[in-house]
Amino acid sequence: MNYFESIFAILPILILTGTALIILLVEAFIDKHFKNLISLILSVAGLIFSMYYLICGMKTNATEYFGGSYIVDNMGMAFSLIISIVAILVIFVSFHYITKKYKNIGEYYSLILFASAGMISLSLSNDMMTFFISLEVMSIAVYVLAGLHRENLRSNESAVKYLILGAFASAFLLLGIAFIYGATGEMHFGKISKILLNHSSEYTVTLGSTGLLFILIGFLFKIGAVPFQQWVPDVYEGAPMSVTAFMATGVKTAAFAILIRGLITIFQVIETQTLVNILSIITVLTMIVGNFMALIQDNIKRLLAYSGIAHTGYILLGIIASKVTSPNNMDISPILFYLLAYALMNIGAFSVLIGGGSDGKDLETFDDIRGLGYKNRLLGLCMVVFFFSLAGIPSTAGFMGKFFIFKSAIQSQSLLLYGLSIIGILTAIVSVYYYLKIVVYLYLKEEKRVYERQSVKWNYLLINIISLVITLLIGIFPHIGYYILKI
Amino acid sequence: MPDFIKNIDQVIYLIPLVPLIGFAINGLLGKKLPRGAIYFVGCVSIFISFVISLMALWKVVESGSAIVFQSGSWISSGNLNVALGFKIDQLSAVMINIVSGIGFLIHFYSIGYMKEDEGIYKFFAYLNLFCFAMLVLVMGDNLLLLFLGWEGVGLCSYLLIGFWYKKEDYADAGKKAFIVNRVGDFGFLIGIFLIFGYLGTISFEGIQGALKDGIPVVPEILNPIVGKDSGLLITIITLCLFVGATGKSAQIPLYTWLPDAMAGPTPVSALIHAATMVTAGVYMIGRLHFLFSLSEITMLVILVIGGVTALYSGTIGITQTDIKKVLAYSTVSQLGYMFMAMAVGAFSVGIFHLMTHAFFKALLFLSSGSVILACHHEQEMTKMGKLCKRLPITHGAMLVGMLALSGVFPYMSGFMSKDLILEKVKHFHSPIMASAGEIFWVIGILAAMFTAFYSFRLMGMTFWGKSNMSDDDYHHVHEPSWTMTGVLVVLALLSIFGGLIGLASLSESNLHTFLGKVFTGQNTVESPHIGLPTILGIIVSAIAGLMYGKNWSFPETFSRSGIGKLLHKLSYNKYYADEIYHFIFVQPIMKGSKLLWRWIDSFMIEGIVNGVARLAQIAGYFGQNFQTGSVNTYAFTFLIGVILLLIYFVVI
Amino acid sequence: MTFFTLNNCIILGLILFSIGAYGVITRRNLLVVLMSLEIMFNAVNLIFLSFNYFLYYQEGRELGQYFVLLVIAVAAAEAAVGLAILVTIYRNRRNVDSDLLKEMKG
């Protein structure tokens, strides 16, 4: 493989890293009034630039670079695109938000970019080393982001919990990698699965599949599946709101990217039935715990964290469905669609929660959002659509996402998946209750209170309208969503 | 046939689109528009679609074939390919005229009724949106479009019930309607998925085509569920669909939302909760009649549910004192009749009753609306009385409606459809239960007697009897504006004469032969005749009218006597259905989630960790400083998860 | 040196890993928790090295060694970030006890 061609293939990652470094440098030299705006422009430019190269580098055939460390294929590209979109949206949402809370603005933007570079690298990685490094680049950047609000005790707590549990999970992941290395002596995904599939030595297979199980656990931790979900609500609740939005969408997308990458390469070694059984138990637990725990929350951030866990369950359902349908050639388009829809509606909802706050305070509890629909009509409308979409009500992206997931589950001709779908639909009905509760609060008036109009900064409006339009658009014409992701 | 009728095919998409545009205008710009403009946009948009609907009906009548409008592929993924298509056949043609026609009248009526409310633009916007969704529902040529409309009307219903957001129980009622409907939708969705899995298509034409040459074999996908028994599969599918219908059409056990939905403005009750949305379940069965008639079990289930609902809600209706609640239970009861008609295979009769019911129930709701408005938003009938002097037009309209509803006045609309239903039920022979026809004929007659009773009880309490208002209030009661009374008069005329299009002895080309082109294989429908049900109805209504009109003390004493007290209490409290539902469904979910939380929080974290800690202390092995702190416990559960997975992995 | 075998090294690594995991679960002082995490990482390093040394080194395959270097770097970065967060927590509440960091739960 030509060296320059390899460099070109990972250019998006290099651009993001470079932009992040430039922002850090530039920050030192410019007037503090322009810091925010210039950082915003630089980072968005970097992201768009990298998206351009992502689309340029798109190949119809999967191609490996750097001796197999990176793989460029449709799936990785689609995940990278979702991640870039998420990063751009989050950067816009952060624009006014961070000036209220932090002094070192450049750090914030560059950390987001570092994390995005890690995520994209993660979704393109094809060997244990690249994968581990990318995961850590992403995670460490996000640990710092979660604790950026230094004076806030909850932000501290969130960061330290995330860090300790994340590192704990990483240790298990590493143990898994070590086992696999012991069994095969290789790091490359393809070579590992080839050796494990061909070698009939019991020692190799046992060591290898135990290692794979540990790696699977590491992935399940990152996507927040039960029983590895306990960090999610605490970390999401404590982190600054814009970072929560980033974690809930970006980190999750990247983690799903690598999970699926694993499923189509190394996890093929594990017998499909065993893998599907394990995932099914976890999926059921995830859907149930996520939805039922969300029912009793009164903090919306925390509620969204639990709802995120529930959505993880639905995506896992889609993954199982495509794994069962064709174990070696998974059709992941429903999952990609769901992730895109989920990212849009979640960032939209967070943007309303940030933008609707006054006096530097975000909207967090049900009391905070009471009557928001009267204070700002547009925000109210957006929030209604986003929550309808999260609840999966027709003509929104969330409905189409669930529709495709359940459809693929039903087409898979397996009794297990019928059962899972029924549990999924039942828990989705439960979820309508808490989403609707929020919508009702938006339009609940306190007696004799006159609501003053409240204006909203341009960046929140922009993100709201973009998310709203795309949510409805791909909810009504889903093939547009497929077109965006080129799947 | 004039040219513009011939070419109507090309513009039928305007029928749903124009109300949608009306919704967009009122919804987006309504805040800035003057009231007049809002009224204009709201009413004219639905009027335009009514006119186009009429022309479409004309064309369908003349040509005898369906109008089809197809766009390109809408969703295509895998082997699912759904085209965005509308189809107006005879059934849809009738439905769109009911929806847009009654819809227009109610829009017009709302101008007067809602004139004191703020945010009127929102109200009209939602009404238009509702009409859009309902029209999509009845025009769609596949199950997905039907389902979209189905969800859309549910959403609008929710928005409109909760229109008066200021009061929390209104918002609650809206929520209840929405959630109960989701339960029904769950069944409906499963039904759709099963149909797709079975026949590989969800367009009505496709389904009918697949079933035309005998029942197809069960595909391999569904073998784990039903084996090779295609009859069983069809039964399951139709039962699932029927669960959806019970949700939307308020049948037992999912009827509780409808009486609560009366919290919304009265025109909404008339349009959504009487004339159109709640009949969607009946329409759906009619639309898929070729599927339903394949399963005798399902048909019997529908008959039983319909019959029991008709009687059950009738018995509740006779003790309610809220004027709108009476009408709500009456609606539930009449929907039960429609389902009975569908169940015995008399599809066109069911649709006929749907139509006449739309006329007279809209009339009744709107009349009650004008009573409520005249009494300053008082809905308790015990606080009314003797209003016939003050509200002559409303009284006349209401009387017409009640005569039609109770079916006691020969050849009025309600009489004809109800009598036909009873006749058809009587001659129904279910292969499973031979005497089902006779039994449900009796139940139907009983229900009709209850109907007659509460109808004239309502008349007696509200219009006849002695006035229970203060003199001052009584003299302030006056008729509403002409826009409202005008609508009442139009609907009254429809209620009187509307039944004639279903009269077989009047003309060869009546509604039943017209619909017969869709419902092929249906038996011929004769003319109704005056028989036992009518006579019993007349007697009961006379008694009720006299009892409450002349203020006999009998009802009072009866409801105080031993058994009477019990019955009255049961009926008045709706057989405690809400409480029972709350106890069975709502509480367990709330309690379950609390329990789960407590379980995870105290058992998993505190319990296990403390337990392990205690064990460790006893063993003296782990050392003393084994304490629970949250990060540590999270790590611990993580480890537990790892260990469980490892165990599973090793054991299996 | 019969004691120096692959199995014994792996078992030593696993024991170290368990000690680390035990520390994470039981110690309240977050500083100690971070140290326990370091033990876990280094236990994995040990396992890597022993696999590399006993199984593949003779064949000239040395990926395991490189991976260990990588893990050391990552662990250092994680420790740096972790310590920085602990310092801010200490500034705010003069304490780094995990029992006191339970504001968010439920």
Image (cartoon, coloured by chain):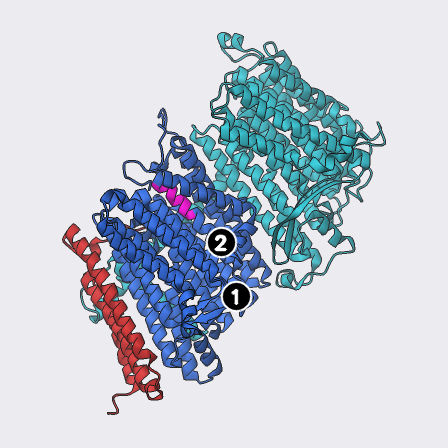
Determine whether A362 is above or below A309 in the image.
above
Badge 1: how crowded within 10 Å, few (<14), some, or many (20+)?
Answer: many
- Per the picture, the main secondary structure of the magenta-coloured stretch is helix
Q: What amino acid does circle 1 point to?
A: Lys
Q: Position of residue A482 (x, y in %)?
A: 54, 54
Q: The chain drawn red is chain what?
A: C
Residue shown at 77%/52% (left/top)? B212
Name the residue that disc number 2 marks: A338
Q: Position of residue C44 (x, y in %)?
A: 29, 74
The residue lying toward the viewer, choosing from B297 and B553, is B297
Picture colour for chain A: blue
Describe residue B268's horizontal placement relative to residue B208 as left or right. left
Picture colour for chain B: cyan
Residue shown at 54%/68% (left/top)? A329
Name the residue that disc number 1 marks: A323
Q: Position of residue B627 (x, y in %)?
A: 22, 61
The residue lying toward the viewer, choosing from B566 and B167, is B167
